[in-house]
Image (cartoon, rainbow, N blue to C red):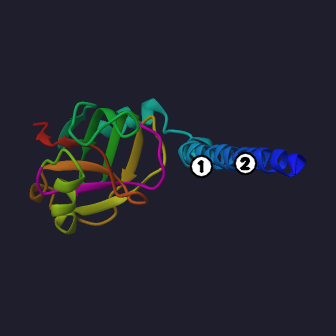
Amino acid sequence: MGESALSSVGSGRPKKRLFVSLLTHLAAVAFGFALGIYLLPILTAPDSPDATVLESSAKTAMYQGDFTKDLDGSDLFHWGTGRIYLSNDSLVHRGELAPGPDYMAYLAPSFVTNEEEFLAIKDQSRSLGSVKTFRGFMLPINEPIDLTRYQAVVIWCEAFSEFITAATLRSVK
């Protein structure tokens, strides 16, 4: 009787160890998965365009604007800095974006500062294409667009419906 009483007292300990071990392993897998999602775009990103190419393209801009980190929807992992330049044939960014997957650049009819505001006007916005580099980018505009219909550029993460940054457009001339 004494031996079975001792074995029943100690039987809770292996279950607790198993539970703690399972919990820590699941946390490690979740952390590794999240880290992989964050790092994969950095590791697979093509080289950013050469600074002289960006500068040359920026000279033809009709509009420009500035990305800043202090917007409502921007945070530690979702931000942009630098200047954007918009012309009839390209959108150029000289600055930095927080790395992430599936970024898209949009022309928006009004300036927005977070996810909710952008989702309210996303169907009125015009996608210019995928942003694959995080230290400056250049997107060609291959079809005519009435640029006067748009007041802002928004960088948006399609995969996670996350606002990254936005800039108000102002005339260069």
Query: Magenta stretch containing residue 78, yes or no?
Result: no
> Where does the image place residue 139, in percent across and percent down from the top left?
38, 51
Looking at the rendered structure, the secondary structure element under dot 2 is helix
> Where does the image place residue 85, in percent across and percent down from the top left?
26, 40
Which residue is labeled 1 in the image? 30
The quarter in which the C terminus is drawn is: top left
Looking at the rendered structure, the secondary structure element under dot 1 is helix
Which residue is labeled 2 in the image? 12
Residue toward you, 101 or 19: 19
Q: Residues within 10 Å of mark 2 (few under 14, many from 20)?
A: few
Q: Is residue 24 above or below residue 89?
A: above
Residue toward you, 91 or 108: 108
- Answer with left or right where residue 128 lies relative to residue 125: right
Residue furthest bottom as drawn: 123
| In front: label 2 or label 1 | 2
Q: Amino acid at mark 1?
A: Ala
Name the residue located 81 percent from the left edge and 48 percent from the top edge: 5
Residues in magenta, as a range: 98-110
